[in-house]
Amino acid sequence: MGGGWKFLFGAPLLVLSACGGGDSAPAGGGTGSGPPDPPSPTSPPSGQLFSFPATESLSAADVQTVIAQAAAQANAQGDGAVISVVDRVGNVLAVFQTPNAPMTAAIPGAPNGDNADIQGADVPATTAAIAKAVTGAYLSSGGNAFSTRVASQIVQEHFPPSPTTIGLESGPLFGVQFSQLPCSDLSARFVDGMIGPQRSPLGLSADAGGFPLYKNGVMVGGIGVMADGIYGLDDNVLDVDVDADESIALAGTVGFEAPVSIRANRILVDGSSLRYTDATYEGLSDVSGASFTGTAGALVAVNGYTNAVIRAGTAYGTEVSGMRPSTAAEFSNPDAYVLTDGAGNNRFPLRGGTDGADIGSPITQDEAAAILEEAFAVMSRARAQIRRPLDSRAQVSISLVDTRGRILGIVRSPDAPIFGTDVSLQKARTANFFSGAFAANEMLAAQGEVPVYVQRVRTFLNDPNALTGAFAFADRSGGNLSRPFFPDGEVGTPPGPLSRPIEQFNPFSTGLQSALVLTNIVEHLTFVGGTSMNDADDTNRGCSTLPNIAGQGTRLDNGIQIFPGSVPVYRGNELVGGIGVSGDGIDQDDMISFLGLHNAGLRTGTLGNAPMDIRADRIVVTSNGRQTRLRYINCPFAPFLDDPAQNVCEGL
């Protein structure tokens, strides 16, 4: 769609813009020196492989300290700022506005000015600060500390982003920004109390100014700041930015710094060091001793997130946080965590498929247990990609759905990053959806721009029957078709049919992924900027305008995901669901889903991966005078801690 969008709701609005980047990152020192390392893991109880995170949380006094320090830095810089603090599961503990803070933030427009989705929009500055805080908290764990600057690096069309890397593949988490959506049926809302994981008003943020918070070395939350009025990203990691938002947010972390040993600049992805921050603790003003009492500014209410008070955070792993260790009756593995309703009940207990009227033989509860148990077992042996110390075990979230997209079970490892919960469900639903006979018809029935992508795919693949179930699509396969260059990263080639052309593309408008949820985002931002606090006036608890299936919601009720880590589930030649994995390296995520399902098939003898002859890697695309085969899954080399085996997915 042409033209710009302005979300003028009578309240602060927000927008993004590109900024520079750099690769310096503090190793401690100055006012930020001496953060404790993560607690030394105690030996897990007998029969367990993972240590559970220590019980820590942000007190109301801690939240006041974080805000006061950030506000002191803002004052020293001469900037007004919106400051948000969240706990580990995304509860907004406070939003504070200093004098002269921006009311809106601007999202960058399309490179060619033909804006689509939320490109070129102004949105409430409060929503930008919240999204940054959620991102700092959700991407981090006891084994890795990631900031929004890291998020910027891993979601762009080339990795790492810079003028000299044009022609490289896209970031490993390309598309993750469209997760934790305000319409997600998985994510909780303010009206639900302190149960997590909570949603984000703008998904995950790629704008510098969001950091995780640690207490006694334990991951407890995040801080996000909007001061410059631009909600953008860093498209050049070769320089060092001076970013007002980032300096203010970093000051807020003093005394709550991420342990040096797990900061992103200690983690390599595809041989490139990640970027934690371009600001340094040494470059900050002295904010030690800053007091909330007397700090100029005020707590502000944000519809759907906070009522202008300070709340204490929940302790992750406890019943009231919404995530806790499973009982033996809920899941067989003693290392497993589940999502809970706060009253002791598993929100997504193991169950059989709901789609008996649609397919011959739905997934049974015993089969669902086998799939999740075997995937969990693969994860427990896998070497982590993004965690420190080296040779840590991978930690992820695993989701299973039936063909209607209904959840048949969700299980997590103890310290898996929170973002992977919603993302693993997106991945499971995406693999199921694009592998189904229903995909094309349901896209054609949707509102807005969504229907046009059906013909784009059919033209691109030279297949008039594409998206009708003839091929099994993993998320890696659909991701191939969702990049602004095809093959991924190459320049001067046409875009994938599910992407926007590079002339119109930026990470705030990815193509079908963003078009599916545009209506929900607009509805939610209207609610945030309006006067009603009634949840019924907010967007639906369910994303997209796809058809409702048997009164249960759409098949994509928390949106789609377009980076790897899922496969569809088959019984013979019949699609019966999808499994999604998220939280570690994308090849690890692929392996856990694919091998977990394969092993479940060996165990049950009744279901497993798609037959080889219908997997999407059998599709050869002729584009720009060359032939390219789609990819299905990609497993890492030497992936296991207990076995030197290589090529563990080959031939399966």
Image (cartoon, rainbow, N blue to C red):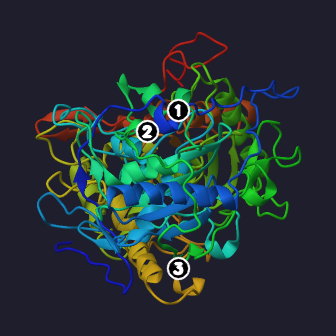
- Find the residue positioned furthest to the top: 644
Q: Are marks 1 and 2 in contact (CB under 8 Å)?
A: yes
**What residue is shown with label 3?**
303
Front residue of 457/591: it is: 591
Quadrant in which the N terminus is drawn: bottom left
Label 2 neighbourhood size at 10 Å, few (<14), some (14-19), many (20+)?
Answer: many
Quadrant in which the C terminus is drawn: top right
> Label 2 is placed on what type of residue?
Tyr
Q: Secondary structure at mark 3?
A: loop
Front residue of 411/341: it is: 341
Residue placed at 43% from the left, 82% from the top?
529
Q: Secondary structure at mark 1?
A: loop
Q: Position of residue 432 (x, y in %)?
A: 52, 52
The correct choice, above or below, for 151 with respect to 239 in the image is below
Along the horizontal axis of the image, is 289 left or right of 587? right
Q: Which mark is residue 33?
A: 1
Distance from disc 1 to disc 3, alpha carbons, whole Å, reads 37 Å
Q: How many marks?
A: 3
**What residue is shown with label 2?**
281
> Label 3 is placed on what type of residue?
Asn
The correct choice, above or below, for 509 with respect to 251 in the image is below
Q: Quadrant of residue 63?
A: bottom right
Distance from disc 1 to disc 2, alpha carbons, whole Å, reads 8 Å
| Earlier residue among tags 1 and 3 | 1
Nearer the camera: disc 2 or disc 3: 2
Q: Position of residue 364 (x, y in %)?
A: 75, 51
